[in-house]
């Protein structure tokens, strides 16, 4: 069984949340499954693969909106003639040209309109409808994207996995100072909103630059705090920091733009993430025919 991942950054990689997620999914693939990864500009010959996962088409290097929807249209065309299982695994809010869904009000949910135009939303609508299934990372992400474009009939909500052997409670709650931690970044941190959350909860907060801490050091850092504040400007489809912090025993205080917080239990959802993802990818197409039916 051969599965192709299509992603804008070479995999495996640990550059960001999407890359961490995809690398873990590749490592936790079922026995008998081979995984291959290409960037969106590659022409790998889809007939060689039993399933294709479109995991991210946004190009690096500031190629702009036209490259974004050109890739979406390219892969929509390729997948319409493909006989295997095809999955769009949405990691951001790709149908929004700004990628961050500032055109969507999260609480209460509503589409505000924006300057994106329709080219990118329409390209991703075509891509979604060319695939067997579209996967979202949280109930909130599916609602947000569904307010921008009409979704196809078959969508799934499956959380990304996190490393629960690494992210765990190492310092008891009572032994931690009653402080909050936040990470500053233009899209990941709304300072006035974070400060409002902090004041409402009577907390002092330490703010670190996003990326200032090596990922390997994050479990120890989180175990030094009782609270983590997440007040992003951009909509986070999941926001793995929320689940990682909870797994380390932190209380997460967030706004309505953190998809993980729309799960009843983000840590449990992440615990089931890999198994649920691979069940979706390897699910036979309706009608009982095709390569996956023969493999299963």
Image: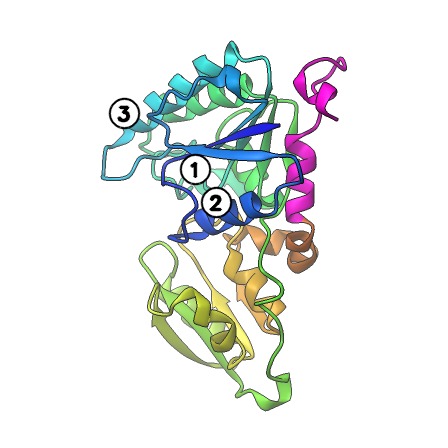
Residue under circle 3? Answer: 66
**Disc assigned to residue 153:** none
Determine the residue positioned at 35% across, 35% down. 58
Q: Answer left or right for 264 relative to 106.
A: right
Q: Are marks 2 and 3 in contact (CB under 8 Å)?
A: no
Q: Position of residue 130 (x, y in %)?
A: 53, 17
- Real-space Cα separation, disc 3 to disc 1, in angstroms: 23 Å
Residue 249 drawn above or below residue 58: below
Tell which tag, 3 or 1, sits nearer the viewer. Answer: 3
Residue drawn at x 70%, y 27% as measured from the top left: 283
The answer to whether the residue labelled 1 contacts the one labelled 2, judged by CB atoms less than 8 Å apart, is: yes
Identify the residue under disc 1: 112
Q: 265 or 14, which lies in front? A: 14
Check whether the beta carbons of the residues at disc 3 and disc 1 lie within 8 A of each other. no
Q: Residue at x 38, y 17 (%)?
A: 74
Colour logic: rainbow
| Labelled disc at residue 105 | 2
State which quadrant residue 248 falls in.
bottom right
Q: Is residue 115 magenta?
A: no
């Amino acid at each position: 069984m051969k599965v192709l991942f299509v992603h804008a950054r070479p995999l495996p990689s640990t550059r960001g949340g999407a890359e961490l997620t995809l690398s873990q999914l590749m490592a936790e693939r079922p026995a008998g499954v081979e995984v291959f990864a290409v960037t969106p500009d590659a022409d790998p010959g889809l007939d060689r693969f039993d399933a294709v996962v479109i995991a991210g088409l946004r190009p690096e290097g500031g190629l702009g909106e036209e490259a974004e929807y050109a890739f979406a249209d390219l892969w929509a065309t390729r997948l319409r003639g493909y006989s295997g299982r095809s999955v769009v695994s949405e990691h951001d809010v790709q149908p929004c040209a700004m990628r961050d869904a500032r055109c969507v009000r999260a609480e209460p949910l509503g589409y505000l309109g924006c300057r994106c135009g329709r080219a990118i939303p329409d390209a991703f609508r075509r891509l979604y409808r060319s695939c067997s299934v579209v996967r979202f990372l949280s109930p909130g992400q599916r609602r947000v994207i569904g307010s921008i474009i009409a979704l196809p009939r078959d969508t799934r909500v499956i959380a990304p996995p996190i490393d629960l052997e690494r992210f765990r409670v190492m310092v008891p709650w009572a032994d931690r100072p009653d402080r909050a931690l936040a990470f500053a970044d233009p899209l990941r941190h709304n300072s006035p909103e974070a400060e409002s959350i902090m004041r409402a909860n009577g907390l002092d907060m330490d703010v670190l630059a996003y990326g200032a801490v090596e990922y390997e050091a994050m479990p120890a850092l989180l175990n030094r705090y009782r609270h983590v504040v997440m007040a992003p400007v951009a909509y986070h489809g999941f926001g793995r920091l929320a689940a990682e912090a909870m797994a380390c025993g932190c209380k997460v205080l967030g706004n309505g733009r953190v998809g993980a917080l729309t799960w009843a239990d983000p840590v449990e959802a992440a615990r089931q993430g890999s198994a649920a993802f691979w069940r979706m990818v390897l699910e036979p197409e309706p009608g009982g025919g095709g390569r996956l039916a023969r493999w299963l």
